[in-house]
Image: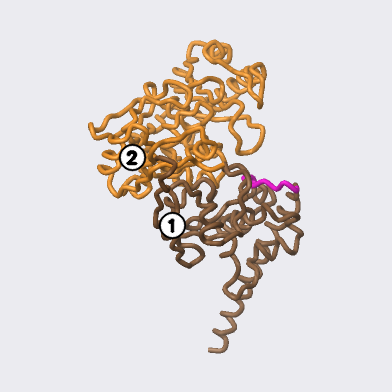
Chain colours: A brown, B orange
Amino acid sequence: MSTSQAEELHEVRLHVNGSVHEVRVPARRLLSDALRHDCGLTGTHVGCEHGVCGACTILVDGRPVRSCLMLAVSAVDAEITTVEGLTEPDGSLSPVQQAFADCHGLQCGFCTPGFLTTITAGLAENPDPTEDEAREMIAGNLCRCTGYQNIVKSVLRASEIQAEIEAEIEAGTEHERGDA
Amino acid sequence: MKPAPFAYLRPATLEDALAALAGQQGAKVLAGGQSLVPLLSMRLAAPSMLVDINALPGLGHVTTASDGVRIGALARHADVLGSTEAAASQPLLAMALRHVAHPTIRNRGTTVGSLVHADAAAEMPMVLRLLEGSVDVASVRGRRTIPADELFVGPLESTLAHDEIAVEAWLPALAPGAGVAFQEIARRHGDYALVGVAAHVETDGGEVTRARVGFVSVSDVPVVVDVTHALDDPAGAALAELEPADDIHATAAYRAHLVKVLTPRVLADAVHHARERKTA
Protein backbone atom coordinates (compact mmCIF):
# COMPACT_ATOMS: atom_id res chain seq x y z
CA MET A 1 0.00 0.00 0.00
CA SER A 2 1.54 3.31 -1.06
CA THR A 3 1.30 6.18 1.40
CA SER A 4 -0.50 8.35 -1.12
CA GLN A 5 -3.33 5.81 -1.29
CA ALA A 6 -6.04 6.05 1.32
CA GLU A 7 -6.35 2.99 3.53
CA GLU A 8 -9.26 0.73 2.66
CA LEU A 9 -12.27 1.28 4.90
CA HIS A 10 -14.75 -1.41 5.91
CA GLU A 11 -18.44 -0.86 6.59
CA VAL A 12 -19.05 -2.44 9.96
CA ARG A 13 -22.34 -2.79 11.78
CA LEU A 14 -21.74 -2.97 15.53
CA HIS A 15 -24.46 -3.94 18.00
CA VAL A 16 -23.71 -2.00 21.16
CA ASN A 17 -25.97 -1.71 24.21
CA GLY A 18 -29.00 -2.65 22.15
CA SER A 19 -28.34 -0.05 19.43
CA VAL A 20 -26.85 -0.47 15.98
CA HIS A 21 -23.82 1.65 15.05
CA GLU A 22 -22.80 1.77 11.38
CA VAL A 23 -19.13 2.70 11.24
CA ARG A 24 -16.50 2.93 8.48
CA VAL A 25 -13.16 1.82 9.82
CA PRO A 26 -9.81 0.51 8.60
CA ALA A 27 -9.26 -3.19 9.33
CA ARG A 28 -6.66 -2.33 11.94
CA ARG A 29 -9.10 -0.27 14.08
CA LEU A 30 -9.13 -1.89 17.53
CA LEU A 31 -12.62 -2.42 18.90
CA SER A 32 -11.71 -0.25 21.91
CA ASP A 33 -10.91 2.66 19.57
CA ALA A 34 -13.97 2.04 17.41
CA LEU A 35 -16.21 2.22 20.49
CA ARG A 36 -14.60 5.46 21.64
CA HIS A 37 -13.89 7.29 18.35
CA ASP A 38 -16.49 5.93 15.95
CA CYS A 39 -19.41 5.17 18.29
CA GLY A 40 -18.65 8.02 20.69
CA LEU A 41 -18.90 5.69 23.68
CA THR A 42 -15.97 6.98 25.71
CA GLY A 43 -16.91 5.06 28.84
CA THR A 44 -14.63 2.23 27.71
CA HIS A 45 -11.14 3.25 28.80
CA VAL A 46 -7.91 2.37 27.05
CA GLY A 47 -4.98 1.68 29.36
CA CYS A 48 -2.18 -0.63 28.28
CA GLU A 49 -3.52 -1.54 24.82
CA HIS A 50 -2.06 -5.02 24.96
CA GLY A 51 -4.49 -6.96 27.07
CA VAL A 52 -2.85 -6.68 30.48
CA CYS A 53 -4.66 -3.95 32.44
CA GLY A 54 -8.33 -4.80 31.86
CA ALA A 55 -9.53 -1.16 31.69
CA CYS A 56 -11.08 -1.71 28.23
CA THR A 57 -13.04 -4.82 29.25
CA ILE A 58 -16.48 -5.01 27.62
CA LEU A 59 -19.05 -7.79 27.42
CA VAL A 60 -19.24 -9.72 24.16
CA ASP A 61 -22.35 -11.89 24.13
CA GLY A 62 -22.37 -11.52 27.92
CA ARG A 63 -18.78 -12.62 28.47
CA PRO A 64 -16.04 -10.19 29.53
CA VAL A 65 -13.51 -9.62 26.74
CA ARG A 66 -10.64 -7.15 26.24
CA SER A 67 -11.81 -4.70 23.57
CA CYS A 68 -8.18 -3.75 22.79
CA LEU A 69 -7.55 -7.36 21.74
CA MET A 70 -10.37 -7.43 19.20
CA LEU A 71 -10.58 -5.75 15.82
CA ALA A 72 -13.77 -3.79 15.17
CA VAL A 73 -14.17 -5.58 11.81
CA SER A 74 -14.18 -8.90 13.67
CA ALA A 75 -16.99 -7.82 16.03
CA VAL A 76 -19.81 -7.78 13.45
CA ASP A 77 -21.68 -10.77 14.83
CA ALA A 78 -21.27 -9.80 18.47
CA GLU A 79 -23.74 -8.35 20.96
CA ILE A 80 -21.59 -5.81 22.80
CA THR A 81 -22.24 -4.26 26.21
CA THR A 82 -20.08 -1.37 27.37
CA VAL A 83 -20.16 0.37 30.74
CA GLU A 84 -22.78 2.76 29.31
CA GLY A 85 -25.07 -0.25 28.85
CA LEU A 86 -24.93 -1.36 32.48
CA THR A 87 -27.33 1.24 33.89
CA GLU A 88 -30.94 0.28 34.41
CA PRO A 89 -33.48 1.23 31.68
CA ASP A 90 -34.59 4.22 33.81
CA GLY A 91 -31.01 5.51 33.97
CA SER A 92 -30.43 4.53 37.60
CA LEU A 93 -27.25 2.75 38.65
CA SER A 94 -26.96 -1.02 38.31
CA PRO A 95 -26.30 -3.02 41.50
CA VAL A 96 -22.56 -3.18 40.71
CA GLN A 97 -22.37 0.55 40.00
CA GLN A 98 -24.35 1.32 43.17
CA ALA A 99 -22.02 -0.90 45.19
CA PHE A 100 -18.95 0.98 43.89
CA ALA A 101 -20.59 4.23 45.03
CA ASP A 102 -21.53 2.75 48.43
CA CYS A 103 -18.12 1.21 49.15
CA HIS A 104 -15.79 3.87 47.70
CA GLY A 105 -14.80 1.32 45.07
CA LEU A 106 -13.22 3.94 42.83
CA GLN A 107 -10.66 6.67 43.29
CA CYS A 108 -9.41 8.15 39.99
CA GLY A 109 -11.97 6.02 38.12
CA PHE A 110 -9.80 5.13 35.14
CA CYS A 111 -9.94 1.36 35.67
CA THR A 112 -13.57 1.41 36.84
CA PRO A 113 -15.41 0.66 33.55
CA GLY A 114 -13.36 -2.54 33.17
CA PHE A 115 -14.07 -3.58 36.74
CA LEU A 116 -17.81 -2.85 36.40
CA THR A 117 -18.20 -4.98 33.26
CA THR A 118 -16.04 -7.80 34.63
CA ILE A 119 -17.93 -7.93 37.94
CA THR A 120 -21.35 -7.69 36.25
CA ALA A 121 -20.55 -10.84 34.25
CA GLY A 122 -18.85 -12.46 37.25
CA LEU A 123 -21.93 -12.04 39.45
CA ALA A 124 -24.18 -13.36 36.69
CA GLU A 125 -22.14 -16.56 36.83
CA ASN A 126 -21.64 -16.63 40.60
CA PRO A 127 -24.27 -14.46 42.35
CA ASP A 128 -23.01 -15.13 45.88
CA PRO A 129 -19.19 -15.13 45.84
CA THR A 130 -16.97 -15.58 48.90
CA GLU A 131 -14.31 -12.95 49.50
CA ASP A 132 -11.73 -15.22 47.86
CA GLU A 133 -13.97 -15.72 44.84
CA ALA A 134 -14.52 -11.94 44.64
CA ARG A 135 -10.74 -11.47 44.57
CA GLU A 136 -10.38 -14.14 41.88
CA MET A 137 -13.14 -12.44 39.87
CA ILE A 138 -11.15 -9.19 39.60
CA ALA A 139 -7.67 -10.74 39.32
CA GLY A 140 -7.39 -9.79 35.64
CA ASN A 141 -7.97 -6.08 36.22
CA LEU A 142 -5.40 -3.57 37.44
CA CYS A 143 -6.19 -0.54 39.62
CA ARG A 144 -3.29 1.91 39.56
CA CYS A 145 -4.67 3.63 42.70
CA THR A 146 -4.38 0.16 44.33
CA GLY A 147 -7.89 0.45 45.71
CA TYR A 148 -8.40 -3.29 45.65
CA GLN A 149 -9.75 -3.73 49.19
CA ASN A 150 -12.73 -1.51 48.49
CA ILE A 151 -13.25 -3.09 45.07
CA VAL A 152 -13.50 -6.51 46.76
CA LYS A 153 -15.99 -4.99 49.22
CA SER A 154 -17.92 -3.58 46.26
CA VAL A 155 -18.21 -7.05 44.69
CA LEU A 156 -19.66 -8.43 47.93
CA ARG A 157 -21.98 -5.41 48.34
CA ALA A 158 -23.20 -5.75 44.73
CA SER A 159 -24.07 -9.36 45.46
CA GLU A 160 -26.11 -8.21 48.49
CA ILE A 161 -27.93 -5.53 46.48
CA GLN A 162 -28.81 -8.05 43.77
CA ALA A 163 -30.14 -10.48 46.39
CA GLU A 164 -32.23 -7.68 47.96
CA ILE A 165 -33.70 -6.75 44.58
CA GLU A 166 -34.53 -10.37 43.84
CA ALA A 167 -36.17 -10.79 47.27
CA GLU A 168 -38.28 -7.68 46.60
CA ILE A 169 -39.35 -8.97 43.20
CA GLU A 170 -40.27 -12.32 44.74
CA ALA A 171 -42.24 -10.63 47.53
CA GLY A 172 -43.97 -8.49 44.87
CA THR A 173 -45.05 -11.53 42.89
CA GLU A 174 -46.35 -13.20 46.03
CA HIS A 175 -48.23 -10.03 46.88
CA GLU A 176 -49.81 -10.04 43.41
CA ARG A 177 -50.74 -13.69 43.82
CA GLY A 178 -52.32 -12.77 47.16
CA ASP A 179 -54.39 -10.09 45.46
CA ALA A 180 -55.59 -12.43 42.76
CA MET B 1 0.28 1.39 19.92
CA LYS B 2 -1.72 0.72 16.78
CA PRO B 3 -1.26 -2.08 14.26
CA ALA B 4 0.26 -1.33 10.85
CA PRO B 5 -2.23 -1.46 7.95
CA PHE B 6 -3.24 -4.85 6.58
CA ALA B 7 -5.87 -6.22 4.22
CA TYR B 8 -8.72 -8.08 5.88
CA LEU B 9 -10.93 -10.96 4.81
CA ARG B 10 -13.71 -12.63 6.74
CA PRO B 11 -14.56 -15.68 4.63
CA ALA B 12 -17.75 -17.68 5.22
CA THR B 13 -16.32 -21.05 4.17
CA LEU B 14 -13.12 -22.94 4.94
CA GLU B 15 -12.45 -23.30 1.21
CA ASP B 16 -12.48 -19.52 0.72
CA ALA B 17 -10.22 -19.05 3.75
CA LEU B 18 -7.72 -21.61 2.45
CA ALA B 19 -7.75 -20.08 -1.04
CA ALA B 20 -7.09 -16.61 0.42
CA LEU B 21 -4.19 -17.90 2.51
CA ALA B 22 -2.70 -19.78 -0.43
CA GLY B 23 -2.77 -16.65 -2.57
CA GLN B 24 -0.98 -14.36 -0.13
CA GLN B 25 2.41 -15.31 1.28
CA GLY B 26 2.28 -12.68 4.04
CA ALA B 27 -1.22 -13.54 5.30
CA LYS B 28 -1.91 -14.65 8.88
CA VAL B 29 -4.92 -16.41 10.39
CA LEU B 30 -6.96 -14.52 13.01
CA ALA B 31 -8.87 -16.70 15.48
CA GLY B 32 -9.10 -15.45 19.08
CA GLY B 33 -6.37 -12.87 18.55
CA GLN B 34 -5.26 -12.83 22.18
CA SER B 35 -1.63 -13.37 21.15
CA LEU B 36 -1.78 -11.99 17.60
CA VAL B 37 -3.45 -8.63 18.28
CA PRO B 38 -0.86 -7.53 20.91
CA LEU B 39 1.89 -8.55 18.46
CA LEU B 40 0.20 -6.40 15.80
CA SER B 41 -0.25 -3.47 18.18
CA MET B 42 3.38 -3.61 19.28
CA ARG B 43 4.31 -4.00 15.61
CA LEU B 44 6.24 -7.17 16.29
CA ALA B 45 4.15 -8.67 13.49
CA ALA B 46 3.01 -6.89 10.32
CA PRO B 47 1.15 -9.36 8.10
CA SER B 48 -0.02 -8.13 4.69
CA MET B 49 -3.44 -9.69 5.25
CA LEU B 50 -5.50 -11.19 8.06
CA VAL B 51 -7.83 -14.06 7.26
CA ASP B 52 -10.42 -13.94 10.04
CA ILE B 53 -11.79 -17.45 10.61
CA ASN B 54 -14.39 -16.40 13.21
CA ALA B 55 -17.26 -16.66 10.71
CA LEU B 56 -16.38 -20.19 9.56
CA PRO B 57 -19.04 -22.76 10.47
CA GLY B 58 -18.49 -25.98 12.40
CA LEU B 59 -15.25 -25.14 14.19
CA GLY B 60 -16.51 -24.23 17.66
CA HIS B 61 -16.88 -27.76 18.98
CA VAL B 62 -15.48 -29.52 22.05
CA THR B 63 -16.48 -33.16 21.55
CA THR B 64 -15.58 -36.09 23.73
CA ALA B 65 -15.49 -39.68 22.52
CA SER B 66 -13.93 -42.86 23.91
CA ASP B 67 -10.55 -41.99 22.36
CA GLY B 68 -10.36 -38.49 23.81
CA VAL B 69 -11.28 -34.87 23.24
CA ARG B 70 -11.53 -33.06 19.90
CA ILE B 71 -11.33 -29.28 20.01
CA GLY B 72 -12.34 -27.16 17.03
CA ALA B 73 -10.33 -24.13 15.93
CA LEU B 74 -12.94 -21.68 17.24
CA ALA B 75 -13.53 -23.29 20.65
CA ARG B 76 -12.46 -20.72 23.24
CA HIS B 77 -10.36 -21.78 26.22
CA ALA B 78 -13.43 -21.05 28.35
CA ASP B 79 -15.53 -23.48 26.29
CA VAL B 80 -12.98 -26.26 26.78
CA LEU B 81 -12.61 -25.48 30.48
CA GLY B 82 -16.40 -25.46 30.84
CA SER B 83 -16.82 -28.96 29.37
CA THR B 84 -17.27 -31.49 32.17
CA GLU B 85 -17.09 -34.31 29.59
CA ALA B 86 -13.70 -33.09 28.38
CA ALA B 87 -12.43 -32.82 31.96
CA ALA B 88 -13.62 -36.35 32.74
CA SER B 89 -11.98 -37.77 29.61
CA GLN B 90 -8.66 -35.97 30.01
CA PRO B 91 -8.35 -34.26 33.43
CA LEU B 92 -5.06 -32.52 32.55
CA LEU B 93 -6.98 -30.22 30.17
CA ALA B 94 -8.87 -28.46 32.94
CA MET B 95 -5.91 -28.62 35.35
CA ALA B 96 -3.76 -26.68 32.87
CA LEU B 97 -6.39 -24.38 31.34
CA ARG B 98 -7.06 -22.84 34.74
CA HIS B 99 -3.55 -21.40 34.50
CA VAL B 100 -3.95 -19.96 30.99
CA ALA B 101 -4.02 -16.16 31.49
CA HIS B 102 -7.19 -14.67 33.04
CA PRO B 103 -10.82 -15.70 32.47
CA THR B 104 -11.33 -12.59 30.31
CA ILE B 105 -8.56 -13.73 27.94
CA ARG B 106 -9.85 -17.32 28.03
CA ASN B 107 -13.27 -16.08 26.87
CA ARG B 108 -11.80 -15.03 23.53
CA GLY B 109 -8.54 -16.94 23.08
CA THR B 110 -8.78 -20.31 21.34
CA THR B 111 -7.07 -23.50 22.50
CA VAL B 112 -6.10 -24.54 18.98
CA GLY B 113 -4.72 -21.05 18.30
CA SER B 114 -2.60 -21.29 21.43
CA LEU B 115 -1.24 -24.66 20.26
CA VAL B 116 -0.08 -23.43 16.86
CA HIS B 117 1.19 -20.14 18.28
CA ALA B 118 3.75 -22.57 19.75
CA ASP B 119 4.83 -20.46 22.70
CA ALA B 120 7.08 -22.47 25.03
CA ALA B 121 5.92 -20.21 27.88
CA ALA B 122 2.29 -21.25 27.29
CA GLU B 123 0.64 -24.22 28.96
CA MET B 124 -1.28 -25.89 26.14
CA PRO B 125 1.54 -26.66 23.66
CA MET B 126 3.35 -28.54 26.42
CA VAL B 127 0.14 -30.34 27.43
CA LEU B 128 -0.45 -31.46 23.82
CA ARG B 129 3.09 -32.81 23.68
CA LEU B 130 2.94 -34.52 27.08
CA LEU B 131 -0.34 -36.24 26.17
CA GLU B 132 0.94 -37.21 22.69
CA GLY B 133 -2.00 -35.53 20.97
CA SER B 134 -2.12 -34.08 17.48
CA VAL B 135 -3.38 -31.17 15.40
CA ASP B 136 -5.29 -31.50 12.11
CA VAL B 137 -4.45 -28.84 9.55
CA ALA B 138 -6.06 -28.00 6.22
CA SER B 139 -4.82 -26.23 3.10
CA VAL B 140 -5.75 -26.08 -0.57
CA ARG B 141 -3.44 -29.10 -0.91
CA GLY B 142 -5.60 -31.21 1.45
CA ARG B 143 -5.64 -32.19 5.12
CA ARG B 144 -2.97 -33.74 7.30
CA THR B 145 -2.50 -34.65 10.94
CA ILE B 146 0.58 -33.36 12.73
CA PRO B 147 1.56 -35.37 15.83
CA ALA B 148 2.58 -33.14 18.77
CA ASP B 149 6.16 -34.41 18.57
CA GLU B 150 6.46 -32.95 15.07
CA LEU B 151 4.60 -29.68 15.68
CA PHE B 152 7.09 -27.49 17.54
CA VAL B 153 10.40 -26.50 15.96
CA GLY B 154 11.50 -23.23 17.56
CA PRO B 155 10.42 -20.21 19.61
CA LEU B 156 6.88 -19.35 18.39
CA GLU B 157 7.52 -21.59 15.40
CA SER B 158 5.42 -24.57 14.36
CA THR B 159 5.63 -26.87 11.35
CA LEU B 160 2.44 -25.46 9.83
CA ALA B 161 3.02 -24.09 6.33
CA HIS B 162 1.98 -20.47 5.70
CA ASP B 163 -1.12 -21.60 3.79
CA GLU B 164 -2.36 -24.08 6.42
CA ILE B 165 -5.11 -23.54 9.00
CA ALA B 166 -5.20 -25.65 12.15
CA VAL B 167 -8.81 -26.86 12.22
CA GLU B 168 -8.88 -29.28 15.14
CA ALA B 169 -6.77 -30.61 18.00
CA TRP B 170 -7.04 -34.07 19.50
CA LEU B 171 -6.06 -34.88 23.07
CA PRO B 172 -6.24 -38.55 24.02
CA ALA B 173 -8.39 -39.72 26.91
CA LEU B 174 -6.56 -40.63 30.11
CA ALA B 175 -6.09 -44.41 30.10
CA PRO B 176 -7.14 -46.54 33.08
CA GLY B 177 -4.24 -46.76 35.55
CA ALA B 178 -2.79 -43.45 34.38
CA GLY B 179 -2.61 -40.19 36.32
CA VAL B 180 -1.79 -36.55 35.58
CA ALA B 181 -0.93 -33.42 37.54
CA PHE B 182 -0.02 -29.78 36.88
CA GLN B 183 1.56 -26.99 38.93
CA GLU B 184 3.13 -23.69 38.06
CA ILE B 185 4.79 -20.76 39.76
CA ALA B 186 4.03 -17.28 38.41
CA ARG B 187 4.93 -13.83 39.76
CA ARG B 188 1.31 -12.72 39.68
CA HIS B 189 -1.96 -14.54 39.23
CA GLY B 190 -2.62 -15.00 35.50
CA ASP B 191 0.93 -14.19 34.39
CA TYR B 192 3.06 -16.46 32.27
CA ALA B 193 4.66 -19.11 34.50
CA LEU B 194 8.27 -18.71 35.63
CA VAL B 195 8.18 -22.49 35.51
CA GLY B 196 5.25 -24.82 34.90
CA VAL B 197 5.40 -28.58 35.26
CA ALA B 198 2.95 -31.31 34.25
CA ALA B 199 3.35 -35.04 34.76
CA HIS B 200 1.80 -38.07 33.11
CA VAL B 201 2.31 -41.48 34.72
CA GLU B 202 1.10 -44.95 33.87
CA THR B 203 0.81 -47.51 36.64
CA ASP B 204 0.21 -51.24 36.84
CA GLY B 205 -0.76 -52.64 40.22
CA GLY B 206 0.73 -49.68 42.06
CA GLU B 207 4.02 -49.86 40.11
CA VAL B 208 4.91 -46.90 37.90
CA THR B 209 5.51 -48.35 34.42
CA ARG B 210 5.96 -45.07 32.53
CA ALA B 211 6.55 -41.51 33.76
CA ARG B 212 6.95 -38.38 31.67
CA VAL B 213 7.20 -34.75 32.69
CA GLY B 214 6.51 -31.63 30.58
CA PHE B 215 7.90 -28.15 31.21
CA VAL B 216 6.73 -24.60 30.53
CA SER B 217 9.10 -21.59 30.30
CA VAL B 218 12.41 -23.46 30.67
CA SER B 219 13.29 -23.97 27.01
CA ASP B 220 12.64 -22.52 23.54
CA VAL B 221 10.15 -25.24 22.60
CA PRO B 222 7.78 -27.25 24.79
CA VAL B 223 9.93 -30.04 26.27
CA VAL B 224 8.80 -33.42 27.58
CA VAL B 225 11.29 -35.65 29.41
CA ASP B 226 10.83 -39.38 29.98
CA VAL B 227 11.82 -40.05 33.59
CA THR B 228 10.63 -43.68 33.79
CA HIS B 229 14.18 -44.81 34.55
CA ALA B 230 15.11 -41.78 36.64
CA LEU B 231 12.42 -41.86 39.32
CA ASP B 232 15.06 -41.44 42.06
CA ASP B 233 16.17 -38.09 40.53
CA PRO B 234 13.62 -36.95 37.94
CA ALA B 235 14.58 -33.27 38.22
CA GLY B 236 18.23 -34.09 37.51
CA ALA B 237 17.23 -36.04 34.42
CA ALA B 238 14.98 -33.20 33.32
CA LEU B 239 17.57 -30.45 33.83
CA ALA B 240 19.98 -32.34 31.56
CA GLU B 241 17.53 -31.65 28.72
CA LEU B 242 16.24 -28.19 29.70
CA GLU B 243 17.74 -24.77 29.03
CA PRO B 244 16.58 -22.43 31.80
CA ALA B 245 17.37 -18.82 30.81
CA ASP B 246 17.63 -15.46 32.56
CA ASP B 247 15.03 -12.81 31.88
CA ILE B 248 13.54 -9.86 33.77
CA HIS B 249 11.23 -12.19 35.69
CA ALA B 250 13.70 -14.78 37.03
CA THR B 251 17.30 -15.92 36.82
CA ALA B 252 18.26 -19.19 35.17
CA ALA B 253 19.39 -20.48 38.57
CA TYR B 254 16.01 -19.73 40.13
CA ARG B 255 14.21 -21.46 37.25
CA ALA B 256 16.47 -24.52 37.71
CA HIS B 257 15.63 -24.43 41.42
CA LEU B 258 11.91 -24.39 40.63
CA VAL B 259 12.37 -27.38 38.30
CA LYS B 260 14.05 -29.25 41.18
CA VAL B 261 11.23 -28.41 43.59
CA LEU B 262 8.25 -28.87 41.28
CA THR B 263 9.26 -32.00 39.34
CA PRO B 264 9.17 -34.52 42.22
CA ARG B 265 6.12 -32.76 43.69
CA VAL B 266 4.08 -32.94 40.48
CA LEU B 267 5.19 -36.52 39.78
CA ALA B 268 3.99 -37.55 43.23
CA ASP B 269 0.67 -35.78 42.55
CA ALA B 270 0.27 -37.69 39.27
CA VAL B 271 0.96 -41.05 40.96
CA HIS B 272 -1.55 -40.12 43.66
CA HIS B 273 -4.06 -39.18 40.93
CA ALA B 274 -3.59 -42.57 39.23
CA ARG B 275 -4.24 -44.39 42.55
CA GLU B 276 -7.23 -42.20 43.37
CA ARG B 277 -8.82 -42.95 39.99
CA LYS B 278 -8.35 -46.66 40.60
CA THR B 279 -10.19 -46.57 43.91
CA ALA B 280 -12.87 -44.16 42.67
Question: Given this view, does label 2 or label 1 mark the residue nearer the observer?
Answer: 1
- Around disc 2, counting alpha carbons within 10 Å, would you say few (fewer than 14), some (14 to 19), or many (20 or more)? few
Residue B112 vertical placement versus A115 (above, below): above
Residue drawn at (39%, 41%) of the image = B50
The residue tagged 2 is B65
**Which amino acid type is marked by label 1?**
Arg
Mark 1 falls on what kind of element?
strand
Q: Does the rendering let one see residue A152?
A: yes
Residue drawn at (63%, 19%) of the image = B246
Question: How many callouts does the rendering have?
Answer: 2
The residue tagged 1 is A24
Give the magenta-colored segment's residue range.
Answer: A139-145
Q: Does the rendering let one see residue B80?
A: no
Residue nearest the viewer, comparing B195 with B236: B195
Q: Quadrant of the N terminus of chain A?
A: top left
Residue drawn at (56%, 25%) of the image = B217
The percent coordinates of residue B268 (x first, y second) are 57, 24
Q: Residue A125 appears in which quarter of the rendering?
A: bottom right
The percent coordinates of residue B59 (x first, y second) are 34, 45
Q: Is residue B271 found left or right of A144 in the rendered image?
A: left
- Around disc 1, counting alpha carbons within 10 Å, would you say few (fewer than 14), some (14 to 19), or many (20 or more)? some
Residues beneath discs 2 and 1 located on the same chain: no
- The residue furthest left is B141
Subunit of mark 1?
Answer: A
Q: Residue B128 appears in which quarter of the rendering?
A: top left
